[in-house]
Amino acid sequence: MVILVEDKNKANAITHSGTFHADEVFATAFLDEYFGDIYLYRACEVEDEDLNNKIVYDIGKGKFDHHYLNAKIRPNGIKYSSFGLLWEEFGRKYLENIGIEDIEEIFNAFDKELVEQIDAIDNGEFPKIEANYKVKTISDVIKIFNPAFNSIQDEGVQFLKAVSLSSKIIEEILENVIGKQIAKKKLEKILKENKKDYLLLDEYMPYEDSIIGKEEYDNILFVIYPSPRSPYCIKTLSKSLSDKKARLEIPSTWWGKEKEDLIKLTKEKDVDFCHPNGFIMGTRSKKSAVKIVENIIGGKYEEIDNN
């Protein structure tokens, strides 16, 4: 539990007061997960004596601060924030404490999924997003918890609300990362045995990270997997991590069509739907899904449409 204290002598952790950001909020949530019973003092400034027997972060220019010229930088050039510095220091031990076996893999995967992006944004490396509408990152969402202009919201209460949300995000992303690592191991065997230009799965599992960006799997054009929405789904694969265009598209004449039209176009009575943007479609049988994919890859539908 995180408890805010007004006397710094009663604190075992110190961060800065005022407007709060994702890095120290997530850092606080992580410290609570790792140590428990965090008595936190939010300070305007830190004196030398405050550094003794307390974890001081995002303030004070100590080990877990990043507001100075020679602060620690990742090998990829992204500067650490307080969250990243604390995760780097305690993350592996935390994973060991909760019984994780593949510590290094999970540590790095969680870092990529969450920590690194918070570090980057907090240090001014904003992602380029081309959209005519407002896009909010996790960092933006945390900022929303700061007291609204002309409101009576209490800053400490709002800070704890943000920490509570961040704790849930940490837990859910970690669970997701662990699941992906389990799926990755299962997929390694499936991919090695796969001899086709598509991947047929007997159960849904996260597959993108195991395929996209891996040169040896550039030949895989579609993935077929069981789905609660439609017994089987056909999904396109993007060309690369940066190029989101499909390696091979589902025919554009199918996109968003009604079921009756799709049956005529595909010649498959088990076809269910095709998304209006064409990246996924569903069928009521594995046989139909496989046949549709093989016909798309084989260029058969042009011949069928001309009959």
Image (cartoon, rainbow, N blue to C red):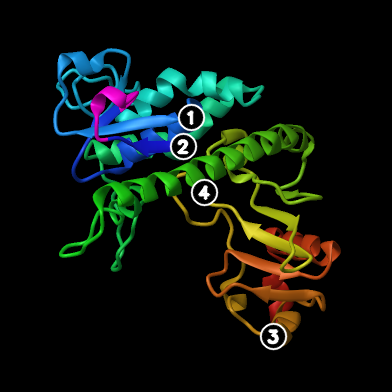
User: Three-letter amino acid code at disc 3?
Assistant: Asp
Q: Nearer the viewer, residue 94 or 303?
A: 94
**Local SS, label 3:** helix
Question: Eyeballing the image, is 87 above or below 117?
Answer: above
Residue sitting at x 34%, y 54%: 141
Q: Which mark is residue 194?
A: none
Residue at label 1? 36
Measured Cα–Cα span from mark 2 to mark 1 = 6 Å
For the C terminus, the quadrant is: bottom right
Residue sitting at x 75%, y 33%: 192
Residue at label 3? 261
Give the mark nearest the N terminus, 4 or 2.
2
Position of residue 255 measured from the top left corner of the image (x, y, whole percent): 58, 75
Give the mark nearest the N terminus, 2 or 1.
2
Give the mark nearest the N terminus, 3 or 2.
2
Residue at label 2? 1
Residues drawn in magenta: 6-13
* Image-quadrant location for residue 249: bottom right
Measured Cα–Cα span from mark 1 to mark 4 = 44 Å
Q: Which mark is residue 239?
A: 4
In magenta stretch: residue 125: no
Query: Is label 2 in contact with label 1 (beta carbons under 8 Å)?
Result: yes
User: Three-letter amino acid code at disc 1?
Assistant: Gly
**Local SS, label 4:** loop
Question: Eyeballing the image, is 93 above or below 239?
Answer: above
Is 148 left, or right, of 244 in this rendering?
left
Give the mark nearest the N terminus, 1 or 4.
1
User: Three-letter amino acid code at disc 2?
Assistant: Met
